[in-house]
Image: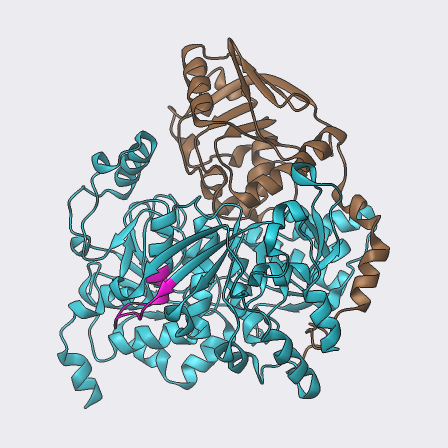
Amino acid sequence: MTGLVFELSHRHYLTEEIMGDRQTSLTLAEKVWNSHVVKQGEGDGAGRKPDLVYIDLHLVHEVTSPQAFEGLRLAGRPLRRPDLTIATEDHNTPTLDIDKPIADPTSRKQIETLRANCKEFGVRLHPLGDAEQGIVHVVGPQLGLTQPGMTVVCGDSHTSTHGAFGALAMGIGTSEVEHVMATQTLSLKPFKTMAVNVEGSLKTGVTSKDIILAVIAKIGTGGGQGYVLEYRGSAIEELSMDARMTICNMSIEAGARAGMIAPDQTTFDYVQGRPHAPTGADWDAAVEYWKTLRTDDDASFDAEVSIDADELEPFVTWGTNPGQGVSLSESVPDPEDFGDENTKLSAQRALEYMDLKAGTPMKEVRVDTVFLGSCTNSRMEDLRAAAEIIRGRTKDPDVRMIVVPGSARVRLEAEAEGLDKVFEEFGAEWRFAGCSMCLGMNPDQLEPGERCASTSNRNFEGRQGKGGRTHLVSPLVAAATAVRGTLSSPSDLDEEPAAAAAA
Amino acid sequence: MEQIIRHTGIGVPMRQSNVDTDQIIPAVYLKRITRTGFEDALFAAWRRNDDFILNKEPFNRGSVLVAGSDFGTGSSREHAVWALKDFGFKVVLSTRFADIFRGNAGKQGLVAGQLQPEDIELLWKELENNPGAEVSVDLDTRQVTCGAITADFEIDDYTRWRLMEGLDDIGLTLQSEEDITAYEASRPAFKPATLPAKP
């Protein structure tokens, strides 16, 4: 079996012209791609047709699937591999009163449609109320369904999350969802590769969220376009799987097709023992294969960028796209300082929407709401880190904080550790799992003009509710901000309460 | 899919970069389970402002959107393409498109043509100075014309071919079903399956 895998992983899809001398030295992304090529695209150079690529895992949720199921039905096509497909409910679901019927009739209709479709086409579904329900990108890894070297797709741009395992994971549109349902493949054009080197060690209070926000600020929201990013270097190797998922999750915010991290012992330890992890001889064969999934020493990338982890500070966005960010200790930038006319216009517009003045220190910006959640930062490590900051401290009375675990399973684990009590004693709301306030699709939304420090992934205009203003931050900054009421890092807090709590 | 070779229609200058898909169609409109009828949702937040370009004659009858860089970033929602099409747009021109948006556009017969920044600037000026001016987009020659302006645009060969032929992707792929079945037989045993569910 491993011999076969070895052979598959060395199949080449790129033409001589594109590959040049890289025929024998491959990046991680190229290895995973090559092992999934069902049929190479015909032709050469610019006229080359896409490769037909096999998909190992298709994640489905209620928002981007109804029209795809309908397409199958109209064409009389079956869903080819229900055993490689799994669905859950996350975008529309409320995070309160989940035992009651969903109040919004259109949301309820969409959820009911998913349930009917899954039943009709034989798809495994974890509905609201189920112990495995939750944000699709939290559920997959947690069940052990996301593994190194796989191709994973979902009708959701944050599918890049699964790249943390060394999987090639991409967000797709509804037409492609239907295509995968019908064929278990996608027609995909080859990609370019970019190394994101993060060397050094993160300081206390700095997290993987700050790494990815700094990367996006550096390369811009379109900087990754056409690329698969591979995050490498000592700072990445030191990260837990939860932290790696946060980085890969926001690859799409840099415009990238995917983000990946080479699997290592941290990855294997995370996967082992999960419900769908291989066992026995299959486990040994899998690990032997997974260990080959590293970029070859002499392989070259089409582009490289470097970030110095030692220099990183907690990061925060000031504008209306994730590339508009600065270190928390800095001030709101002056649009006049941007050289390019379009960038200047975009910054002016963003400051107007955000109601911020150039030169205001970020730490003086007062927020109304703190949101801890989303597929970016709602896993156990995120909740633990935030709980550690607020334990024994008092919430700013004018700030509301809502804490939304990424999945029902995360919620149960957090409660087993008593984290729910820590949040509730602090004055935060402890909710049920879902996408919640990351996007304005369910009851959790900002009011017009309301300002939020959010651990989610997008600060677009109106993303968290019409007229809402979003500052993207790490869970640590979110927690410290809830204490002080202004954007804050843990180092801004008095040390006393934590010491008292420890005693 | 509808075949498209060339299109001529009123150009809409949208001087803005980073038009993300949350702006093109806010999430509240994604709850529908149909594939059509999203015209009211297009740029819903911005359309509340009377000065927004699509609220004004003759741009409300536009079919060629000329936008700034990084159009269609963010969420994968194909609804963004459906909303643009339902409103009447056949073509979007920009200096750079987000990958997922461009893919979705190609699947739905919306032409996403990539132009040089200086050509976008020329088109903006022409359309602002002559509201209602028509833009012609020719997939065969890969050229955009408007008034005295002629500019080459980029679109990948495969998407162009599919648009010009009006081909259905799934039907094309199913012609390779034997290859898919053969590949499936070679997949290693350790690859996970969702069924049966394991506790």
Image spot of residue A67 (x, y percent):
68, 48
Residue at the spot 48% in from the left edge and 31% down from the top edge: B95
Q: Is A157 above or below relative to A205?
A: above
Residue A61 seen in the figure = no
Residue at the spot 74% in from the left edge and 34% down from the top edge: B1
- Chain with cyan colouring: A
Residue at the spot 40% in from the left edge and 34% down from the top edge: B17
Q: Give the side of residue B41 with respect to residue B195, left or right.
A: left
Residue B172 versus residue A24: which sits nearer the camera? A24
Image spot of residue A85 (x, y percent):
69, 65
Quadrant in the picture for residue A118 = bottom right
Residue A107 versus residue B160: which sits nearer the camera? B160
Residue A401 seen in the figure = yes
Q: Is A389 above or below relative to A194?
A: below
Q: Is residue A194 magenta?
A: no
Coloring scheme used: by chain
Q: Give the side of residue A102 with respect to residue A120, left or right.
A: left
Residue at the spot 39% in from the left edge and 85% down from the top edge: A417
Quadrant in the picture for residue A487 = bottom left
Q: Residue furthest right?
A: B178
Residue A138 versus residue B155: which sits nearer the camera? B155
Q: Is residue A200 magenta?
A: yes
Q: Give the side of residue A47 with respect to residue B87, left or right.
A: right
Quadrant of the rendering where the C terminus of chain B is positioned: bottom right
Magenta stretch: give its range: A198-211
Quadrant in the picture for residue A392 = bottom left
Q: Colour of chain B?
A: brown
Image spot of residue A94 (x, y percent):
48, 62
